[in-house]
Image (spheres, rainbow, N blue to C red):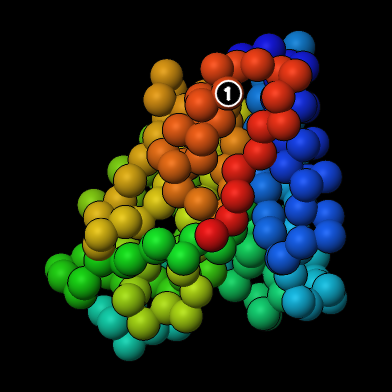
Amino acid sequence: MKLGKYFFFVITIVIFFTNGAHTCTTFCFQYNNEWIYGRNYDWYIEHCLIVVNKRGVAKTALTQDNPAQWVSKYGSITFNQYGREFPLGGMNEAGLVIECMWLEQTEYSRPDSRNGLSDLQWIQYQLDNFATVDDVIASDKTVRISVRSAAPLHFLVCDRYGKAATIEFLGGRIAVHTGDDLSPTVLTNNTYEYSKRFFDSFNGDETSTAFVTAD
């Protein structure tokens, strides 16, 4: 997708929801062989901390559901409103970026042999341990977000190697869009599949008012 169409798609969403309900958008695109990642964050709480997370720190997930344990491999900078280790998004020193958004349709998997993480600590776990989008996707084999987590979330992830993915948990299973299946690389407060169908209904007509509603 052309750069102009990205800006059109994202800016139209932001303008449309300026006076509406609390809604968020994340997006990323490549320009001059570099990734540009952006988001808007509309929420009831306005205060936050910018936290520096160090490498080499031993951690245990805050859940009673077979909690994961690990030692951070990468340092990171995160945006936190609910305390250290519970970021809403951030970037690690390997260039991995993760941001979350609300998704009512989210359904995390039931308890199984995998280690559990709370919803926001899942973000910190990924930033602590991995450098690539593929690593984040593969981690679903060993860790999961606990069903006891309070917030239904989905995520837009990208890395320094030029790969991006949406990660959602629908019907108790991970749902990923990446590569040719991720165009445009934009995520709102609906599932990516729903938003993409809505966007495609305009047949790429940049003169249309292309926006995605938040249910």
- What residue is at 72 percent from the left and 31 percent from the top? 209
Determine which quarter of the picture holds residue 15.
top right
The answer, for residue 93, to whether it is visible in the render is: no
Q: Residue furthest left?
A: 113
Image spot of residue 117 (x, y percent): 39, 71
Q: Residues within 10 Å of mark 1 (few under 14, many from 20)?
A: some
Q: Nearer the viewer, residue 24 or 132?
A: 24
Determine which quarter of the picture holds residue 85.
bottom right
Determine the secondary structure under disc 1: loop
Image spot of residue 78 (x, y percent): 70, 60
Image spot of residue 34 (x, y percent): 71, 20
Quarter of the image for the N terminus: give it: top right
- What residue is at 51 percent from the left and 40 percent from the top? 195
Determine which quarter of the picture holds residue 36.
top right
Tag count: 1
Image spot of residue 181 (x, y percent): 40, 25
Q: Nearer the viewer, residue 42 or 141?
A: 42
**Which residue is identified by label 1?**
202
Q: Is residue 111 left or right of residue 108?
A: left
Q: Nearer the viewer, residue 20 or 143?
A: 20
Q: Nearer the viewer, residue 136 or 152?
A: 152
Residue 3 vertical placement versus 71 (above, below): above
Report the amino acid beneath label 1. Phe
Quarter of the image for the C terminus: give it: bottom right
The answer, for residue 15, to whether it is visible in the render is: yes
Residue 70 vertical placement versus 63 (above, below): above
Q: Is residue 27 left or right of residue 133?
A: right
- What residue is at 72 percent from the left and 65 percent from the top? 21
